Image: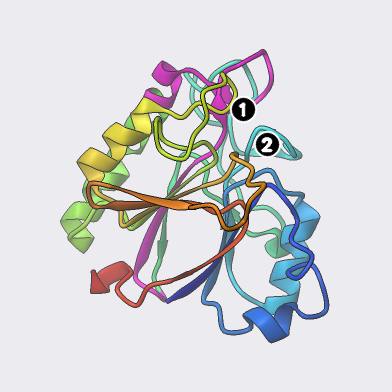
Amino acid sequence: MKILCISDQVDPLVYSKYIKQEYKDVDLVISAGDLPLKYYEYIISTLNKELVFVFGNHNLERLSQFVNDGRSLLPGYAPVTLLPEYDGECLEGKIFYDKKHDLIIGGLGGCKRYNLGRHQYTEREMRWRIFRMLPRLYWNKLVHGRYIDILVTHAAPFGINDESDPCHEGFHALLDFMHKFKPAYLLHGHIHLTDFNAPRAATFEQTRVINVYQKYLLEDDKLGGKR
């Protein structure tokens, strides 16, 4: 399976007439946030591929359609609806089953709380968001034999690909998620890369954690039910 992963910065090759030439054979597009919806529109309409995404802490157009737009998610989610067809499907706080590829994907966007901005969470709030996903995770284990294949986040897990400042520090809750539910991949953005030769990936127990800043092509023939 081949997945085009994007986050944080528009890639000039993806957002160009060469996108079909370079990425016509991808099976799916995944965004880890902080990108304009018009970028998604261009990718979907040009490649004719499914795109799933989470929001980051910038480019929050239409965020309130998918999550409670208050200070936290504790009161519960707003009804989850699809964006217009060309804009893809939002994964915020939900699990998506891609029947075509037998792939289970979940999403938890946003970042660590560092001011009063939107889509920022404390550790407690992030754990609550995960708690709300538990019924579907356990259902997946019962029906599909595994909890989840890919978790898409905006922020990194604590101590893995993150930074020490309050904005870019990762979540301990994501470490616990990987320990318990063992996704094959955790794909995140938020941490900008100035050196594209710098390491993007690390391994935590059974999970490959990858910073998909700007663009990353994930290829794995063992994804989904083939794991």
Which amino acid lies under the numbered mark 1 shown in the image of this protein? His
Measuring from the top left, give residue 10's x and y in whole percent: 75, 56
In 3D space, how far apart are the residues under numbered discs 2 and 1 (Cα atoms)?
8 Å
> In the picture, residue 179 is in which quadrant?
top left
Measuring from the top left, give residue 43's x and y in whole percent: 72, 68
The answer to whether marks 2 and 1 mark residues whose Cβ atoms lie closer than 8 Å is yes
Magenta segment range?
Answer: 100-127
The residue sitting at 54% across, 52% down in the picture is 198
The residue sitting at 72% across, 35% down in the picture is 58
> In the picture, residue 190 is in which quadrant?
top right
Residue beneath disc 2? 63
Which amino acid lies under the numbered mark 2 shown in the image of this protein? Leu
**Residue 39 vertical placement versus 172 (above, below):** below
The disc at residue 119 is 1
The disc at residue 84 is none
**Residue 63 vertical placement versus 214 (above, below):** above
Q: Residues within 10 Å of mark 1 (few under 14, many from 20)?
A: many
Measuring from the top left, give residue 118's x and y in whole percent: 67, 24
